[in-house]
Amino acid sequence: MDVLDGIHTRARKKLLEAFNFVDENQDRKLSWEEIKTCFSTIEINVTRDDYLAFCKSDINNDGTLDFDEFCRFALSRLQKVFNEIDTDGNGRLDEHEIQNVLKKLSIHISIREIDSILHGMDQDGDLFISFPEFCDFFSDLPNVNIRAVAARWMYGVGFDIGVDQIPAPLPPPEVPIYQFMLAGGMGMAVSRTVVAPIEKIKILSEISTRGKVKMLPQLKSIFVNNGIRGLFAGNLTNCLRVVPNGAIVGLVYTNMIKYTPVDDIKNPHQPAWRFLSGTVAGLASNISTYPLDVVRTRLTIQDSNPNYIVKYNGIKDTIRTIVKQEGVRGLYKGMTPTLISLAPFIGIQQSLYDYLKIHVEESGTIAKSPALFLACGAFAGTVAQTIVHPLEVARRCMQCDKEVKRDSAIRKSLNYALRSLWREGGVRRLYAGLTPGVLKIVPSASISLLIRDALLGRLQNEF
């Protein structure tokens, strides 16, 4: 059977783009030297098997490959990987074969996510992946091997919308965990810097005792009085917080997933295990970096709040002053609402995102794409943030209660804080700052993903 038999137009289109990219002199033929040069440019090692595949594909023995011969060359490399996964040799891949190859690479994902991989590639609805369907998904993959295939599969099921409390997706198998955590942390740091002015208005709204803070007038006032520096006050502390925060989340989450039965097809509690892993990761990261969140909050608001009493001069001075005046406990003010909101936030966001993504995939009404999943993630994050937002407001007020002239009940406990905020303005007061909080989600998510995937070299891996 010819390797070109049954190959779909989509795969041939991808192969034509690759052919034109490699064909530098535009003579519609590819020499072995052109292929080696291209592989070297994208840092892929050429093997003897690649050369033998080139020679075998050169049907007319002229030392070059025309487009059809190039298709045979590229697809023969894919066929080798396909056969390696197809352990029963029946010419099609099922969920068990996908699960087994991922297990061999120490990648532990749920059977639900494996089903998502299967449904994303299965075009004829038979719940199997044929070789032509496999080619549609991987024919533009330059480095053809099991790990590269697994990496693209994982890229299709992992998603991060750039919110601090959401656990990171599992790292691609070819990327060291430290590199993945660093890329995620850098992506979060850049995204937080871009949306820092919006975040500043959000925090000012949450702790304001003077009624609603209007976003545009407040931004203008900050710029006039304090310049660009005022818009980004506290951002350095936030960046110092989110980088280790993301690293700790990734480290704890991936290890929790590794030792919990999330990939057991007979385990009815798989969603609970994943939820537990995410919650533990979130708790560990928030407890470890929480003092920096308190410092960031106080530095962010001190220049823009007329009721602010104490003035701080940088990160070290803020920490020193808080410990001196309030003790070490002052660095952990507001942690109770943070930890209480963590579990429902992750649960609501993750479950709603999974539901939306699966529903869209099954409906077939909208083409699957990173932009679509970003929209699903942003919507899920918005709903989750809306539900737990009163706890966010209480947290901010507890973090800076001593510096702002207000009801002393705020500092006593979460219960007192919520009751005091209710007396100040009811539902509106409890949801102060929600609008700028929602407005930052989409740009924060987009930039975080873009930077992370650029650092991981995955921008070419689109659906």
Image: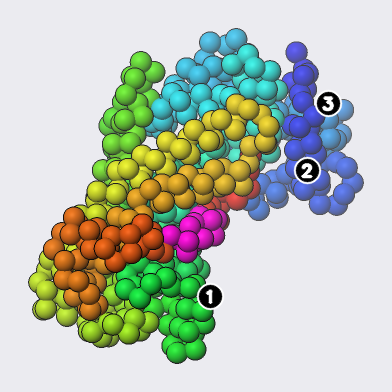
Cα–Cα gap, marks 2 and 1 = 46 Å
Please report the bounds of the magenta region as a residue range: 434-447
Q: Can residue 100 be seen in this view?
A: yes
Q: Residue 229 occupies which quadrant of the picture?
A: bottom left
Residue type at mark 2?
Glu
Residue type at mark 1?
Leu
The residue carrying mark 2 is 17
Q: Which is more N-terminal, label 1 or label 3?
A: 3
Q: Residue 75 occupies which quadrant of the picture?
A: top right
Quadrant of image for the C terminus: top right
Q: Can residue 196 be seen in this view?
A: no
Q: Is mark 1 on a helix, strand or loop?
A: helix
The residue carrying mark 3 is 59
Q: Given this view, does label 2 or label 3 mark the residue nearer the observer?
A: 2
Task: Looking at the picture, tell me which residue is in the foreground, 422 or 362.
Answer: 422
User: Where residue 266 appears, x then y in whole percent?
Assistant: 35, 15
Residue 324 sits above or below residue 112 on the image: below
Q: Residue at x 60, y 26 (%)?
A: 362
Q: Is mark 3 on a helix, strand or loop?
A: loop
Is residue 448 toward the left or the right of residue 309 in the image? right
User: Where residue 450 appears, x then y in whole percent?
Assistant: 55, 56
The residue carrying mark 1 is 216
Is residue 364 highlighted in magenta? no
Q: Which is more N-terminal, label 1 or label 2?
A: 2
Cα–Cα gap, marks 2 and 3 = 22 Å
